[in-house]
Amino acid sequence: MGLPPDADPEEQRLAEARERMVTQQLISRGINDARVLEAMRTVPRHRFVSPDLRFAAYTDNPLSIGLGQTISQPFIVALMTQLLAPQPADRVLEIGVGSGYQTAVLSGLVKEVIGIERVPELAREAGERLRALGYTNVKVIVGDGTEGYPPCAPYDGILAAAAAPTIPEPLLQQLADGGRLVLPVGSVDEQLIELVRRRGGSFHIERLTPVRFVPLIGKYGFKRGW
């Protein structure tokens, strides 16, 4: 997104880097949902990493956010968001909030985002960051993401930013009829993004892109990190 001519030079450079990210990393690799692309153009990814990494924020790489967690590379964020097919009236459950970047991207695409983060420090920081940046339709909760969040179920979409050994059963049960679930599933070394669509009591599963995520730890996930 362009900035006014009198904008801070650093912010202008970051905005230009964000636009290159969209054209070179996303559009060129098949991201074609106009709403998703606009969200990726709008959300300042550099505000979701440490200041010393701000100029790396728009590179095609995951980045550390501390405490053994990462922010996914932009292409994967955009791909998973596009697969989720978020609609303006949707309520979405996000598992593994991390720094809050994926939460912010979803915020502009749906009515409400419920985010679960198991690390209290990350949850607190993400909640504060999202509020400071004006994302008002999000709620960040500390908890076990593999159990979902029953008080706000059912969800039109569920997205997990960590890999599970199998699809957690509570997430299937909290998915609305017609809803979509996107998450990485697999072993330590081999994971695929899976897209699950619910039709009544049936679940249609597509196994898609190979990825490498941190483990989804919890009752229905991995018992510890790797």
Image (cartoon, helix red, strand yellow):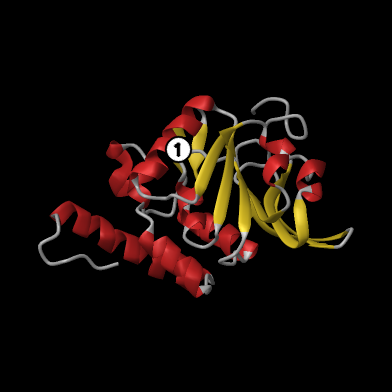
- Which quarter shows the N terminus? bottom left
Residue at numbered disc 1: 127
Which residue is painted at 79% across and 49% down in the image? 172
Classify 102 as above or below 53. below
Residue 114: x and y in percent read 58, 46
Q: Nearer the viewer, residue 45 or 137?
A: 137
Total of numbered circles in the picture? 1
Q: Nearer the viewer, residue 120 or 82?
A: 120
**Which is more toward the observer, 167 or 198?**
198
**Farthest-out residue, left:** 6
Q: Judge from the rendering whether residue 183 lies leftward or rightward of residue 120; answer left or right.
A: right
Position of residue 82 measured from the top left corner of the image (x, y, whole percent): 58, 65
Image quarter (top left, top right, bottom left or bottom right) of the C terminus = top right
- Residue at the far right in the pictured view: 201
Q: Quadrant for residue 141, please give it.
A: top right
Quarter of the image for residue 125 reads top left
Residue drawn 28% across the image and 38% down it: 51
Residue pictured at 51% horizontal, 34% vertical: 69
Relative height, residue 110 to residue 183 (above, below)? below
| In the rendered image, the vertical position of residue 118 relative to residue 102, given as above or below | above
Could you say where residue 42 lies in the image, as x and y percent from the top left? Answer: 37, 61
Lateral position of residue 56 relative to residue 62, left or right: left
Q: Residues within 10 Å of mark 1 (few under 14, many from 20)?
A: many
The amino acid on which the numbered mark 1 sits, given as a three-letter code, is Gly
Q: Is residue 168 shown to the viewer in this render?
A: no
Residue 64 shown left or right of residue 159 in the figure: left
Q: Residue at x 28, y 48 (%)?
A: 55
* Residue 190 appears in view: yes
Q: Position of residue 71 (x, y in %)?
A: 48, 43
Q: Secondary structure at mark 1?
A: helix
